[in-house]
């Protein structure tokens, strides 16, 4: 499907995997069940841009991590579902709970457990270092690697194709200016 045929104006939800999408996929385990993840600040701004544009942004991940809980709260993510070992089952639950349909979703995945969702959504996306099999189902593959600004790249790509990138940037800048005045 060409970019011009993608339904950018119909998408209201961006869902993404965490490990291998929002992070580089490395899992750092320490003693006493400590887990560390590295998040890129550009990805955080990409999520903020999408939320400013009116999208609900969320994660659907097979692992459960306090680091993900903290980062999702920092970014005020709308949807957080961890521990979903069957991603398709988790996706069905989220659709019912939050009241959205497949044709309203941009989904970012990186491995074969993401394919069943990617086959259903309006805009399936993967990252540069996603599995080759996943790339077959993606309408867009990022230039950036997972955890190194790929989500920001997707946010910019999406908003530019939807035609409101400049408006969203202006809205954010105006908000910060107003906050300084008060």
Image (spheres, helix red, strand yellow):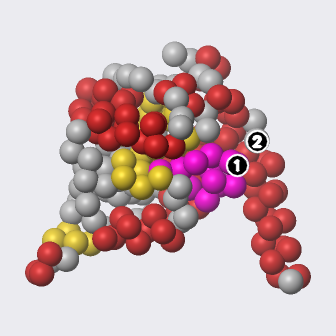
Q: Please, is residue 11 above or below residue 75 in the view?
A: above
Asked which quadrant contains residue 86, the reply is top left
The answer to if 53 sits in the magenta stretch is yes
The alpha-carbon separation of the residues under discs 1 and 2 comes to: 8 Å
Query: Which quadrant is the C terminus positioned in?
Result: bottom right
Residue at 12% in and 81% down: 32
- Measuring from the top left, give residue 14's x and y in whole percent: 52, 43
User: Which class describes the residues within 10 Å of circle 2: few (<14), some (14-19), or many (20+)?
Assistant: some
Number of the label disc, if any, that sits on residue 21: none
In the figure, 30 relative to 69: above or below?
below
Please state the horizontal and vertical placement of residue 70, each as a whole percent of the image.
Answer: 41, 72
Q: Which segment did they paint magenta?
A: 47-58
Residue 47 left/right relative to 63: right
Indicate the secondary structure of the residue bearing disc 1: loop
Q: Is residue 182 visible?
A: yes
Q: Which residue is mark 1?
A: 53
- As for residue 46 lying within the magenta part, the answer is no
Q: Is residue 11 left or right of residue 94?
A: right
1 and 2 marks in contact (CB < 8 Å):
yes
Residue drawn at 49 percent across, 27 percent down? 102
Across and down, in percent, residue 101 comes to 52, 29
Residue that appears at 25% across and 53% down: 83
Question: In the image, which disc is placed on residue 164?
Answer: 2
Which numbered disc, 1 or 2, marks the residue that appears first in the sequence?
A: 1
Observer-nearest of 141 and 155: 155
Q: Quick one: SS at disc 2?
A: loop
């Amino acid at each position: 499907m060409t970019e011009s045929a993608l339904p950018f104006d119909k998408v209201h939800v961006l869902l993404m995997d965490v490990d291998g999408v929002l992070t580089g996929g490395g899992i750092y385990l320490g003693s006493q069940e400590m887990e560390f993840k590295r998040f890129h600040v550009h990805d955080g701004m990409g999520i903020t841009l999408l939320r400013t544009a009116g999208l609900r942004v969320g994660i659907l991940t097979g692992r459960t991590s306090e680091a993900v809980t903290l980062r999702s709260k920092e970014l005020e993510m709308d949807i957080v579902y961890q521990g979903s070992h069957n991603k398709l089952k988790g996706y069905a639950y989220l659709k019912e709970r939050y009241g959205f349909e497949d044709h309203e979703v941009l989904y970012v995945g990186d491995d074969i457990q993401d394919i069943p969702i990617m086959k259903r959504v309006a805009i399936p996306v993967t990252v540069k270092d996603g599995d080759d099999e996943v790339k077959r189902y993606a309408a867009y593959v990022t230039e950036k690697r997972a955890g190194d600004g790929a989500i920001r790249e997707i946010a910019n790509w999406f908003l530019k194709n939807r035609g409101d990138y400049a408006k969203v940037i202006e809205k954010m800048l105006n908000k910060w200016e107003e906050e300084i005045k008060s």
